[in-house]
Each structure stands twice: as C-alpha cells, then as structure tokens.
Image (cartoon, rainbow, N blue to C red):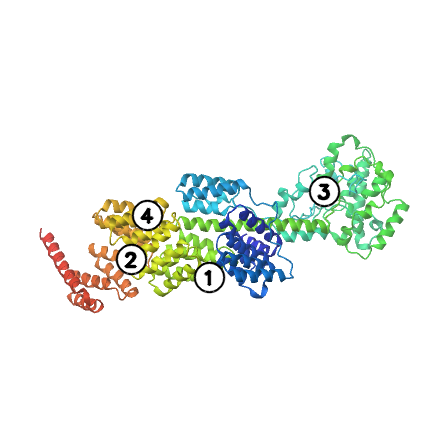
Amino acid sequence: MQQEEFRATSSVTTSPHIGQRFQVLIWTCLDYDLAQSAVFYAERYHVMDEQNHDARHLYATALLRARQPHSALYVVSSTEHAKCGGCLKIKGQCCMALSRYRQAHEALEAALEDTNVPSPSVDLGTARAFSEEAALRCRAGTMAMKGNLPEKATASFRQALALNPLLWEAFEGLCLLGTAPEVDEIFPPRFLPIKQAPPDEPPPTTVMPGPTATGAGFFTPDVAQNNNILRGRKIYPRAFRMDPPPGPRDLLATNDSFLQTESSFLQPPVARGLRTGNAAAGPSQPPARPLSSADETGPVQKRLRSTTRQQSIEMVKCKPSKPSVDEPLKKARARPALKFANIFSSPGRRSQSIQNSRNTTGVGKNERHPGNNGVGPRRSTRLLSGVTSKPTGKHPPLRERRRQLTTSRSRSTESDVEEDTIPTADVASSTSPTSNAQSPHSDTSPAPSNWTPAHEQAAQEAYEREMADYYIYDLMRRFARATRALSVYDCYSCLMELEHIPSTHQQSSWVLAMVGRAHYERLEYASAERAFRAARALEPYRVYDMEVYSTLLWHLQQNVQLSFLAQELMSINPHSPQAWIAAGNLFSLQKERSHALACFRRAAELDPSCAYAFTLSGHESIDEDLDKAISFFQTALRADQRHYNAWYGLGTCYLRMSKIRLAEYHYRKALEIHPQNAVLLGCVGMTVERRGDKTAAYSLFDQAVRLAPDNALVRYRRAKMLISMKRYQEAIEDLQELRNTSPEESNVVFQFAKVYRLMGNEVMSAHWLAIARDISPKSVNKLKKLIDTVKDEEVRDDQMDEG
C-alpha cells in the first residue's frame, strides 16, 4: 500500500494542478502577511522544479516579503542564462531593498526590453486557500507568544488551525510553545484518491426525447417466480463484482459508491479506465443495439447455443398464462456470462442480459408497475429493446430480418468487443415519433454506457486535482510530524520522519537546517556541522538557525569557520540577532568576554524575545559574577519558559553556590523539557551524588552513556562513579575508551593513575603518572594532591575495616 501511494504521489509532481494549488496557497499567505508560511510553501514548490519560472518568482517574492532580500536576489540571479521579465523585475525590487540603485535601474531597464511573455505567477484574484479570520487568529497568536502570553497564544493558534490546518505558522507556534497536539488530530489521515471509472452497470437515466433500448423489454418477472427457468443450466462465475442494491442510482452515486471504493483495492485506479472500451469487462453490460439476423444465421459453431435456447423457449411455452412476460425473460437469460462464453454466442445477442442485470433493473420496474404484467410491449418498443416482434414466435418478421441482416453484413468483419461497444445512436436512429409517444415507461429505462472521451478527460482532471490536494496534505503531515518531534526533542523520530519525505524536499535548505538542529541536540556535532554546511551551500544568505550553527562551531573549537560565518552574517543583515550571536560566540571562543557580552547584549536589544541571547550572556558571566549570571538566566526564562539552556544555567549557578537542592530542581526542570539530553542526565547525577546516593547517581550516569555513547563527559563521570564504588575493572574499561577518543586529556590519565594506585598496582600507577607529567607539565601540584588523596583514602578504608 505504501509503494502504491509513493508511485501515485511521485507522479503528481508533474501535474499542473499542484502548481495551481501551491500558487493559491502562497499568494493567500502573502496577502494576509504570513510571510514565514509563504516562504515555507514557496520553498516546497520551488524545490519540486527549480527550472519553473512561476515557482522561482513566488519563492523570491516570499523571501523579499520576509525581509530577506539577499536570499531573494540569489534565487533570481542563480540562473543567468534563463532569466525572464519576471526575474528581472524581482531583481530590481531586491536591489532597491538593498539600496543598490544602479543595479536596480539596469534590471528594470532589462525587464522593459524583454520580449517574453510575463510570468503568470500573479495574484489569483478571489481565490483563497483559507479565510481572513484564520490568518488574523494566527497573527494574534504570534503576537501573544512574543508578548509572553503562552495561554492566549495557544488558544489563538488552535482556533486558527481549526479553521484551516494548512496555516504553517500556527502549527509552528504551537510547537515552540510546547503545546502542539498529536499530528493526526490536526491532520487526520486521508485515503489515496481513486480515479472515477466508467460504471460496470450503468444506472437508470432519464431520457426525455424517447425511450432507451434495454435487453429485456419494459417488464421483467420477479426472480422468485421464475427460478425454474434456470434449472439445469450452468451458472458461470462472475469477475470480482458485488450486486448493487435494487433500485435506480444516479451517476454520481454510482461513481462514489461503496462498490467503487472496494473494487479500487483490487486493481490500480488508472487501470480501471481501460474498461471503457471492453465489452467483456463486466457480465451485465447494457445492450448496444437490437437483435440482428445473425442470431439465426450465424456460424455453425455458434448454433450450439440454439439448442439450449430452444429448450428454454419450450419450457416457457408450457406456461400460457404469461406469454408476453416470459418471452423477454427468456431472451434476457439466454446468454449468461458473455466474457466466458464468447465463442458460443452470436454477435447480435449483446442485448440479452443475465440474471444479475435483471435483478438490478427489472425487479424495480415490477415494483413500480405491478398492474402491467399482462400487457405486451408495442412493436416500436420491441425494435428498440431488442425483443422479437411476436411474443411466442421463434423468428423476427421478414421485413425486420432483412433490415437487420443488412446491418449485420456491414459489421461482419468486426470483433465481438467492437460490436459490444456500438454507440447508442445506431439504435435510436430507428425510433419514430409515434413510438416515442407510445412508450409510457421509457423515462426510467436503463441507458447504455455513454462513457465518452470527454467523460474520461473530466475524470482524469478531477483525479489529478484530488491527487494534488492529497500530495500537499500528505507532505504537510510529514513535515508536521518532524517539526513536532523536534519541538519535544525527540530527535531520532524527527530524523526518521525527514528520511521519509520525498527526495526533492530532502535537498532543501530548510530540511537540512532541521537535520543539523536534530543532530546538534543529540550532541552529534560532526553530523550537525555537515548538515549546516550543506544548508548554507544551497542557501548562502540564510540567516535563520545560524545562531545554532555558530554555537556548534564554538563547541567544535573551529575558530576560522566561526569567524568567517560571523563576518558573512554581519554583511548580510547587521540588524539580525543571529549575526550578533555569531559574533559573540567568536569573541567567547577567543576569551574576550567583554566583547562577547557586548555582542549578546546587542542581539537582545534587536529582539527582546530572543531568549538565546540572554542565556549566552549568563553563560559568559558565570565565571565572574554568579548573581549577574542568574539574572540573565531568569530574563531568558521570562522570554521563553521552555528554553532548557537557561534552566541548565541556573542549576550550574546554584551548584557552584553549593545549593544542591536548588541545583537539582533546575536540572530536573531542564531534563523535563529535553529528556534525551545526556549532559542534563549527568548533571542531575552529579547533584544526586553530592547528596550521597551513589546508586541513583550511577543509574543516571549509566542512562546518559546509553543515550550518548560518544559523549566523553558523561562517560568520564561514570568512570569516576565506578571508582568511588570500588568497581575498578569497569572503571578501567571506561577510561580506556576515553583514552582512545581523547588521548591528550590529562584528567583521564590522572584517573588511570588513581585507579591503579587503589588496586595496589604501584608500577602501573607510576607509569600513568609519568605520562601525566609529559602531557601536562604544569600539573605537578595536582599530581601530588592526587597521590595524597589516594593515601588518605587507603588509610580511611583500613581504619573502617579494623573497626
């Protein structure tokens, strides 16, 4: 089922309907000042076909409205050889926003000289993807979130999504607030659209000019009253069909019925359209023309059917009470299962329907006209319905036989399938005005299949429109699941969801930046750095998420790359908080704390709701002024209560102040927000260890190592805990792992010397102490303290054993 869905959705990307859907959605967002939503949808549209001028213009326009003129200029300038008037016009607007007036003049002059047709990507007038009320509620939620009113912001976002789930800013706001519901609640799953196919059993239709030919006349006896006719006859199997309920159904009900939905699971939707021209597709196809003389003068091998037919006639003759009723029934039952016995039937017997056809049409007529069972049909009606002129006769009249023989000979070279699909006009041509007036029940007679190429084209267009809507809806469900998973810091689920989106969207800067953030939160710095670098290669002027990238480079100690990033961001937009945060991280890496604090303060001034700027200011002040650092962290929490870095900073401050209970409280608050963070687990373990609960502390350290096996800090703390618990061999294993990953870390070497001294191995202890002196010559005092501490612990242990 997933493979079929993937094939169906992958083919819709080339449909023009999906472009129209995206254009309406993007322009609606732009008209209602939802610039971030417009950028998101425009990027989805652009990555599907980067050579599409409409998608390029919309993406550049959305970036320009979002105050990203550098990125917009890059989009329209990336293809110099394929520029059009629309690209040049947008380029002029970008240059004006950047105060590059000469370049703007050149671009506008070139746009005037362009002879190509302007891009049709303009405002689509009254077409709107959602109402203005939904947009206003979304913007109200955004303002409430920035004004530190989380409850009102949540209510506004939920109301906006209830009006239309495609408001991306509303869903993203709920994720930032940590109140996003399950994705299936906002985006309930939908079934894959099914293409409308020609009905296997056409429903009754209303034809005002005259009667419509049927295979069994106006009246058909009830099934329960004539079961003896079918005795002794072989019943052929039917092909994957269910009998619809009796009574007429209109065309819309037939195409959208439960029967059509069930049959779609048996074969692909497109394949069903092939049944339009195949008469053998269903056993109850409607008649296409009246009986011809080929019924009696057909080939020899087809005369094998006449014996059975004659026996049926003789059986009917035994009932003289209803001759005019049994004769049409005999004709209707004389040819069961055409698709399985084609070589034994005559070409003209298409008008005879089988038992199931009688059940769905004739019974309903008997219920409506119970008093007409003994009235024989008129001659003109019998000519139309394919019944012989005499109710008990064996052959049609000579005049009618000659007329039908001429038609039969002109079509003798056609195949059985072609004869079964003759247009209805050939039958209707023999209808006279008199017969039209004398057909009282022709308005409810079942009509033959009139599925024309126009119907097929209309069904295909409707199917493509439904597939376009389904593609966008399903794409939004996937992005929503990934965004919600990242908001609750379930980074592994986020990465898995991003892997299941279409490959064209995986190579977009938005997705790559999201992958980088997920790896960063998992403390996988190398993978995160690769993802951010790829995102900047696709969008060199990207500003969003660059504050996380700059902190990542700070952790990796990449001074040159961080300096280059800070300078580029400053040249792109010096009024963005991301640029000043990158500059502050650069000064922090260079140990220039005063300059770093000045940059972080400037970032907070540009965006007072930027909690990250206050948090970094607190971390920069923690070594000099704990009270000032606590004030910064508290300000960050007032801006964003879910900023776990600020909770972590407060815990660190209280731990340095030896306030163990307060430190543990703030660490646990941070851990509630980000339960998958190994560093936070290690910090909680440190506070628990300070309280004297070594077993609980070791459990927390062990859980942290399982979450992040490559994290050296939590493994080092677990090794120290194992040493304190006198589990020396396990501690040596952890220390050896740390030695392999961080060979120049002197603390690991000191712990090796300590554990061997405690084990009584003086030779190995002296060996590791010598290595420690080579790695860190300035740590002689630390080594002496280590040796004295180990001796004191040995004396204390001996005294406890003696006591």
Give whichever of discs 4 and 1 has the lower sequence position.
1
Callout 2: SS: helix
Callout 4: SS: helix
Label 2: how many Cα within 10 Å (few below 14, some 14–19, many 20+): some
Q: Which amino acid does label 1 sit on?
A: Pro
Label 3: how many Cα within 10 Å (few below 14, some 14–19, many 20+): many
Label 4: how many Cα within 10 Å (few below 14, some 14–19, many 20+): many
Label 1: how many Cα within 10 Å (few below 14, some 14–19, many 20+): some
Q: Which amino acid does label 3 sit on?
A: Ser
* Residue 601 image offset from top left, x and y in percent: 34, 52
Question: How far is the residue under mark 1 from the one under mark 2?
Answer: 29 Å
In the rendered image, the vertical position of residue 14 relative to residue 356, given as above or below: below
Task: Verify CB contact (< 8 Å) between mark 1 and mark 2.
Answer: no
Question: How far is the residue under mark 4 from the one under mark 2?
Answer: 26 Å
Q: Which of marks 4 and 2 is in front?
A: 2
Question: How far is the residue under mark 3 from the one under mark 4?
Answer: 71 Å
Mark 3 highlights which residue? 357
Give whichever of discs 3 and 2 has the lower sequence position.
3
Q: What residue type is labelled 2?
A: Arg
Q: Is residue 256 left or right of residue 351?
A: left
Mark 4 highlights which residue? 670
**Residue 593: mark:** 2
Q: Nearer the viewer, mark 4 or mark 1?
A: 1
Task: Verify CB contact (< 8 Å) between mark 1 and mark 3.
Answer: no
Give whichever of discs 3 and 4 has the lower sequence position.
3
